[in-house]
Image (cartoon, rainbow, N blue to C red):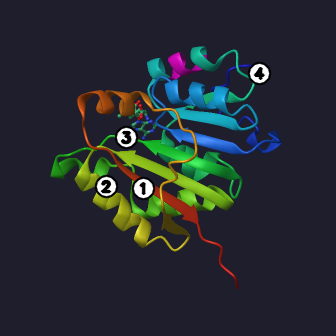
Amino acid sequence: MEPCADPDWNLSAIGMPIEVDLGCARGHFLEAMARLYPNRFFLGVERLKLRYEKTIRRVASLENAMAWQVDSRQAVKSLLPKARIDTIHISFPDPWPKRRHHNRRLISPAFLQECAQLLNSSGRLRLMTDHSGYFSVMRAAAWVCNELTEVEWDHREEYPMTEFQKRFALSGVMVYCLALKKVRHSF
Ligand SMILES: C[S@@+](CC[C@H](N)C(=O)[O-])C[C@H]1O[C@@H](n2cnc3c(N)ncnc32)[C@H](O)[C@@H]1O
């Protein structure tokens, strides 16, 4: 498959479960996941050109991975197909720790609501952060999102560590994990 930067590329044509890594950086996690699960398709989303290009080089030989250079907000709002995504990974989104920068944070109730609309009926969101304050914000945002419910983090499933997760593990930094699942409404 040709590496693809074009978000108009037709994801609907993919006949495999789709997982999206928002803020994929240099694509380490994306590559490891694509190698581990060849029957799933992995899309990395990264806004910085150099990181996106590194990702594209990293997954160039893989049939089941590609990346977009685009803002995650735009990807979620208007580029990704609705009710089609199996899992959205958001690992260590920039925490913007200063109060005056909190409005730059990616995770909000509205953003999670938009993510929920992309998930299929058994879809999941997996969030990780090293920032306890941001973790509380993530949880509070999930609570007000009526299309998502918190579930236990599944430690049985094999997940390679992300680039930042490895760094934090080496330096003994605490990592907070939040797993959310799409709610099935029975009307
Ligand atoms: C702290 S790093 C974490 C990288 C990776 N997820 C990991 O766990 O190793 C955050 C990454 O998200 C990217 N990023 C931040 N905001 C973004 C946005 N709005 N859209 C797309 N990428 C974003 C940054 O450029 C950076 O590569």
User: Could you tell me which residue is drawn at 66 percent across and 26 percent down?
Assistant: 35
Q: In which quarter of the image is residue 19?
A: top right
SS at badge 2: helix
Name the amino acid, label 1: Leu
The correct choice, above or below, for 72 with respect to 112 in the image is: above
- Camera-near label (4 vs 2) is 2
Q: CB atoms at circles 4 and 3 under 8 Å apart? A: no
User: Could you tell me which residue is drawn at 48 percent across and 55 percent down?
Assistant: 153
User: Could you tell me which residue is drawn at 60 percent across and 32 percent down?
Assistant: 33
Alpha-carbon span between mark 4 and mark 3: 29 Å
Q: Mark 2 points at which residue?
A: 135
| Residue reaching furthest to the bottom | 187
Q: Does the residue labelled 1 lie within 8 Å of ligand 1?
A: no
Q: CB atoms at circles 1 and 2 under 8 Å apart? A: yes
Q: Name the quarter where the N terminus is drawn.
A: top right
The correct choice, above or below, for 153 with respect to 162 in the image is: below
Q: Does the residue labelled 3 lie within 8 Å of ligand 1?
A: yes
What segment carries the magenta color?
52-56
